Amino acid sequence: MENSVMTDDNAAPAAAPTADRRNAPEASVKIDAENVNVHYGETHAIKDVSIGILDKTVTAFIGPSGCGKSTFLRCLNRMNDTIDICRVTGDILLDGHDIYDQQIDPVQLRARVGMVFQKPNPFPKSIYDNVSYGPRIHGLVNSKAELDEIVEKSLRRAAIWGEVKDRLDAPGTGLSGGQQQRLCIARAIATQPEVLLMDEPCSALDPIATAQVEDLINELRESYAVVIVTHSMQQAARVSQKTAFFHLGVMPEYDDTEKIFSSPSDKRTQDYITGRFG
Amino acid sequence: MTDISVDWASPAIADRVKKRHRADLWLKGGGMAALGFALLMLFILVASLVSTGADAFRQTHVTLDFDVSESRVSPDDIFKGNFRAIVNDAIEARFPEVTSRSDRRTLTGILSNGAQGAVRDAVFADPSLIGRSVTLTVPVSDPYDQLMKGLIKRDTPEANRRLKDNQIAWFDQLQAAGLVSKPINWALLSNADSRFPEIAGLKGALWGSFYALLVCFLISFPVGIAAAIYLEEFAPKNRLTDIIEININNLAAVPSVVFGLLALAVFIGWFGMPRSAPLVGGITLSLMTLPTIIIATRASLKGVPPSIREAALGVGASKHQVVLTHVLPLAMPGILTGTIIGLAQALGETAPLLLIGMNAFITSAPESLFQPATALPTQIFIWADSPERGFVSRTSAAILVLLTFLIAMNTLAVILRRRLERRW
C-alpha cells in the first residue's frame, strides 16, 4: 500500500550507527517510570509501562497512531492533569522523587520538564515576550538585564538568535513554521528545564525546517534529557540514542536505537519498523 | 469490489445532473427571496419612520424683538421676572390692530410656552439685557408649526381646522415680514421632555439611557465574564454545572416584563431604591444582559485554540495565568462583540423600565444615577401615548434616534470583531 514508507524504513537502520556514535557512555537515569497505567474514563490507554529515561540522551517514542506514546509523554510533565477523566497510576520518579506526589506542584514541575508541541504554538505576543514569559512567571530573574540574557541565551541555544535578534519586538506568530517551532523550543528551555519533552515537533514542518530542528535536538542533548515522540522512524533513527516502541498501550521494547532498528527482539517491533503495519 | 459500469453520457445521468442544478437554484433563490423580503420590511419600517419623523428635525421659529423692561424683570431677582408678559408684549407689538381681549389671548398663542424660557435664559446669561430690547428667535406653538409643515391644510373648512382664518392670517403676516424660519431642531436633542411638543426633547431620555446602560455595563460585564470563566475553565463537568448552564440559557429567554416585576418587588420594594432611577433601570437591564454576555464569553473562550492553553501550561503557567494572560485576551473580541450586542438589546428594552417607573413625565435631565429619568424607549412610549399632534412626528423622530444608536453600537461590534479577531 504505502510503498514509499516501506523503502524509507528499510533504509533507516543504516542511518542509526551515526547517531549512536555520539552516544554518551556514562548517562544516568533521569526519569524512572514503574508500572504506569493511564485510564481515560473507561479506556485503558497505557498498560504497565516501565521505562528508565537517561539524562543527556535523546529517547524516541515510536509506534502506530493511538498506541499511547503521546499520552505517556504527557504523563511525564503531568499535562494529563488538565483532562478531567484522565487517571494515572504507578510511579514516575524524576531524580528519584515521585512527580505525582502531593507535595509536587505541577506548575513547577512543568518548568523543570519543558514541553514542545506538535503544532508550533507561540503566544500571539512578541518574540521577546514569548521567551521571557516562563522565566518571569517563575521569578527566575531579578532584573531586566538578566531577563535579556536568558532570552538571548535561549534563542541562541534554539539556533534562532541570528534570525530574530533584530526584531525581538515582532510578533512570534509572524515567523515561519520552522522558526516558530524553534522559538517554542527557546521558550521551553528558557525556564532552565532538566528534561525536554517533544511531541512530534517536526510533523508540521517542511524538510529543511525539520533538519534544523533535528540538529538542534542533537545539541540540546548535551544539556538535557530529551524525549521525542515521532511518527517518522528515520527521524527516530537520526536523532535518538534510545528508542521505546509503543503498541496498543503497552511498550513491548525499549533499547538502544541501533538495536531496535537493526535487530529488534520483539516481533511487533520488527513488524512495525519493517512497515508491516502502522 | 464489484464492478459497476457507469455510462456517464446516458440521459438518466444527464437528467440527474439537471435536477441537482435545479435544486441548487431553488435553494439559492429561496434564500435570496427571504433576504429580499426581510430587506423590504426593513425598508418599509425605516421609510415610514422617516416620512413621519423627518418633520420633527425642523422646528418653525419666529424672530421677534423682546423688550426686557425693568418693570417686568428686576435685576435683583431675575427668576421672579414676568417673562410671560414680555413675550406677550412682543407679539402684540407686531399686531397693534388686535385689541379685543379674547383675540389678544389667541394671538399670544402663536408663540410657544418655551418662548418665555428662551427669553429668561437669555436674560440669565446676560443680565445687562434688562432695560434693553433683545432680538430672539423662539419656537412657535405646535399648531403653527403644523401649518408651516403643511400638516394643517389651509383648504380644510374653517370649522374643521385647528387654526381659524384670522390665526392663519396673522401667521401669514409674520411670514410676509420675513420673521418666520424653520431651522434644524436641535432642541429635540438638547431639551428635556415637555408637555408642549414644540419644545419637547430627548435630553432626559438620552441621559437616562446612558446612565442605565453604564450601570448595566459595570455590573454585567465583570460579573458575566467572571461567571463564564468559572463555568468554562474551572467548573467540573457534572450535573450541577449542566443545570446551571440550562438555567442561564433559560434566563436569556425570560420575558423582560418579568425582570421588571422582580426589580419592582426587590430593588424598589425591599431595598427601597429610588423609583424611576437609572440606577434601578441599569440593574434590571443587567439581569437581562448577563446571560447574553455569559453565553458570548463562553463561546469565545471555547473558540481560543487549545494549543495556546497547552503552550502556557507547558511553560508552567498556573491556571489563572493561562486564563488571564493568554486565553482571555484572545477571547476579548468575541466577548466585546457579545457585550455590545447585549447592551444594544438593553438599550431598546422597554417593558422592565415601564414597571420601575422610568416612564414618568420628567422635564429635566437626570444629573445622577439616583434622579428620576426616562430612557429612550420609554420616552417613545410616552410620546406615542400623547394626544398632541406634534408628538406624532416626534415619536418617529425619537425612534430614529434610538435606531441610530442601535446601528452605531452594532457597527462598533462588527468593527471591533474585524479589528481584533484572528491575531494568533
Image (cartoon, grey):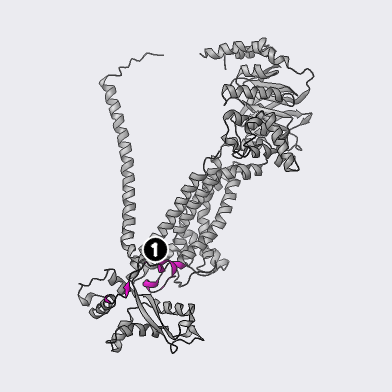
- Which of the 4 image quadrants contains residue A167? top right
* Residue A261 rendering spot, x and y as whole percentages: 66, 12
Asked if one can make out residue A245 in the rendered structure from this viewpoint, the answer is: yes
Report the front residue among B282 and A168: A168
Element assignment for label 1:
helix
Report the front residue among A32 and B249: A32
* Residue B414 rendering spot, x and y as whole percentages: 46, 47
Relative placement, left or right, of B424 versus A71 is left
Image vertical order of residue B220 relative to residue B90, above or below? above
Give the mark count. Answer: 1
Is residue B183 located in the magenta-colored stretch of the structure? yes
The structure residue drawn at horizontal position 46% and vertical position 58%, both measured from the top left corner, is B347
Our reading of the magenta stretch's main secondary structure is loop
Image quarter where the N terminus of chain B lies is: top left
Image vertical order of residue A199 relative to residue B342, above or below? above
Q: Which residue is mark 1?
A: B398
* Residue A135 rendering spot, x and y as whole percentages: 71, 39
Span colored in magenta: B176-203
The structure residue drawn at horizontal position 68% and vertical position 27%, both measured from the top left corner, is A37
Report the front residue among B354 and A213: A213
* Residue B388 rendering spot, x and y as whole percentages: 34, 72
Is residue B144 located in the magenta-colored stretch of the structure? no
Crowding near the residue tagged with mark 1, few <14, some 14–19, many ≥20 C-alpha atoms within 10 Å: many
- Which of the 4 image quadrants contains residue B132? bottom left
Specify the amino acid type for callout 1: Ala
Asked if one can make out residue A116 in the rendered structure from this viewpoint, the answer is: no
